[in-house]
Amino acid sequence: MVTFGRALADAGWTDVRGFSDPTARSLLPPTWAARLDAMKARRRGGRQQAALKRIGNLMALRTKAIDTCVQEAVVGGAHQLVILGAGLDGRAFRMQGLEAVDVFEVDHPDTQATKRERAAGLTLKARSLQFVAVDFERDVLAPALAAAGHRASDPSVWIWEGVVMYLRDEAVHATLAAIATQSAPGSTLVIQYNTPERLNVCSRLLLRLLGEPQIGLRTPDRFAGELVAAGFRVVADSGSADWGVRFGTPVARSATGRRMVIARR
């Protein structure tokens, strides 16, 4: 769904200026790619098209907000990018400025097998890309990263996007501790998370029926405390409305509760 939202935005269902993700359609499963192509062939207009634009706008804003943080961290000296729960992320194949950056994508091995297959035809823009197989609920992150060549002595920029809300507290705390051990001074951690007001009762029930209950919702104050306890310094915490102001695209009220925290070592 996240990749489909980026693909919608890349196909024009967004008001976010300058957004582009040419990798998104290539990374979609065939059925979703066909669905996107069918939507592109239809005449624009109507409630369904408006709903698609809301999805495209939200994903474009979230992506732009995170990309901007990554670019600033790279300019500041981070030559490693670690994407936790990478899924079908396309940054290593689309982002400018990663020519001197080593990218590490961390995710479940089954997800990574699918990602490798769909990314086979894409051209790498980063200096290198390593796939690191980890189950956040069971595996230890730091040794897996070290074995893949991640350098704990060099600054990194970390992305943890759309994952925290699906994890138990123990997994979140263990991952934060592992990130801290692998983060040299000057490292940046970017986390997208959801707050409790993000979901109403119907949304919670639907996600449970789909097998994806959001059990890790957090308030900004609570998350800040957890980050400080793990050894990080919180420098910013913003919501989707703030991203809309920054990038000139107002967001729907239904999009509230989606936030991004930036912390540093």
Image: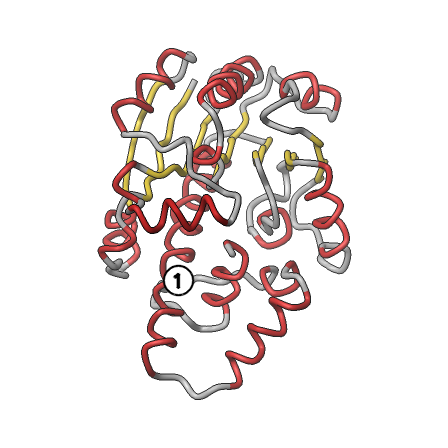
Q: Quadrant of residue 121?
A: bottom right
Q: Residue at x 32, y 40 (%)?
A: 259
Q: How is the image coloured?
A: secondary structure
* In this picture, residue 179 sits left or right of residue 263: right
State left or right for residue 252 relative to residue 122.
left
* Label 1 Cα neighbours within 10 Å, binned few <14 / some 14-19 / many ≥20: many
Q: Position of residue 65 (x, y in %)?
A: 38, 47
Q: Foreground residue, 76 or 12?
A: 12
Task: Name the residue tied to disc 1.
Answer: 55
Find numbered disc 1 in the image and state the secondary structure of the residue it sits on. Answer: helix
Which image quarter holds the C terminus? top left
Residue type of the residue flagged with mark 1: Ile
Front residue (pair 133, 203):
203
Above/below status of 46 relative to 242: below
Residue 14 x %, y %: 38, 68
| Displayed quadrant of residue 164 | top left
